[in-house]
Image (cartoon, rainbow, N blue to C red):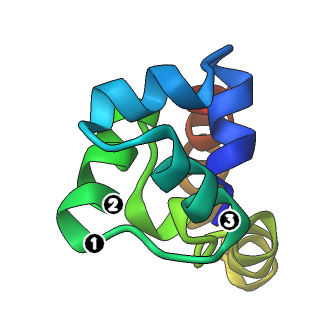
Amino acid sequence: MILKELRIRQGMTQKQLAKLMHVSSQTILNWESGIYEPKIKQLIALADIFHVTIDYLVERETKISYIEKIKNADNDDLIEILKQYLTQITKNK
């Protein structure tokens, strides 16, 4: 999960995120370290906080998936796929 990367991009500390999520800073550290995983309600909240999809948060939808979509797209779909990708990476900045 790219939680740490998203949190840092937002200029947020573990303590600040923990407060938003109503969990301890240790819980955030455990999520970022891969020791534990957030429950589905927590994943939804994290996705909302960082304005990303859950798939993106758990790295199911990566740059590679967009590259595959672009490779397989016809001309009509190509612009829409590029718009989606640009929207996604803009949200994560």
> How many discs appear?
3
At label 1, the amino acid type is Lys
Residue at (66, 74) in percent of width and height? 34
Disc on res. 81: none
Label 2 vs label 3, nearer the camera? 2
Please tell me which of labels 2 and 3 falls first in the chain: 2
Residue 48 position in % (x across, y down): 30, 39
Would you name the residue on which mark 2 appears? Answer: 43
Would you name the residue on which mark 3 appears? Answer: 75
Would you name the residue on which mark 1 appears? Answer: 39
Residue 71 lies, with reference to residue 16, above or below; the image says below
Residue 23 position in % (x across, y down): 31, 43
Please report contact status of discs 2 and 3: CB closer than 8 Å, yes or no: no
**Between residues 76 and 93, which one lies in front from this camera angle?**
93
| Residue 76 visible in the shown view | no
At label 3, the amino acid type is Asn
